[in-house]
Image (cartoon, helix red, strand yellow):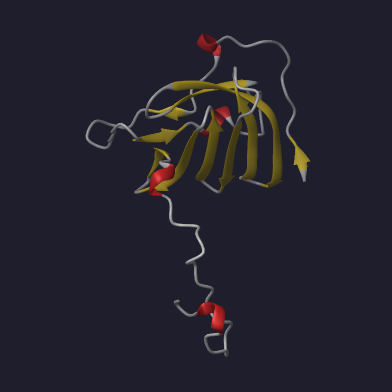
Amino acid sequence: MVLCGLMSGPVRAAEAPSLFLALPQGQAASSADRITVAIDFSVISPTGPAPTAITIRLPDRTIMALKAGCEVRGRDDYTWQGTVSGFELSTVLLTVMGRMVFGHIDFEAASYSIETKDGAYLVTRQDPSRRGPLGNDARIPPAPGQGAGPRDQAP
């Protein structure tokens, strides 16, 4: 494992490069809680002069992410780690594997995901009210070769 270095000095939002690129007309889709984008891998690459801050357009706002580090596991296999500028309790994780990016951004009681979709990337604001139930009615599947036990049966 290798950790990417950081450049020094403050960065203004106008100077921070954008993580996302616009898609050609007809490919871009957006709504109140999701947008479709392309990724500029050069701004998070562990090789070359990586910026200390990047701008990230989300469905409902644009943020500046400050780089905290980068873990390199192999060629085109790394995780860019950072925080959202102005939010001490925030997380920005961008994991690159080959030419795919999977990401998660948390701050100010908001949560966003970045995932591949039809050759582009879908940025979605997560809605906690749409998450699956985590109550006592969850069932545990039986282990291979075992039948259903008492805790696996509906009440």
Foreground of the two, 130 or 54: 130
Give the image location of residue 62, x and y in percent.
Answer: 44, 21
Residue located at (60% from left, 17% from top): 86
Give the image location of residue 124, x and y in percent.
Answer: 40, 39
Image quadrant in which the C terminus is located = bottom left
Give the image location of residue 48, x and y in percent.
Answer: 66, 27
- Viewed as shown, does residue 134 lie left or right of 72? left
- Viewed as shown, does residue 9 lie left or right of 154? right
- State how many labels appear: 0
Q: Residue furthest left?
A: 26
> Against 53, is 115 above or below?
below
Residue located at (63% from left, 36% from top): 80
Foreground of the two, 112 or 49: 112
Give the image location of residue 29, x and y in percent.
Answer: 27, 36
Which quarter of the picture shows residue 8? top right
- Viewed as shown, does residue 11 lie left or right of 153? right
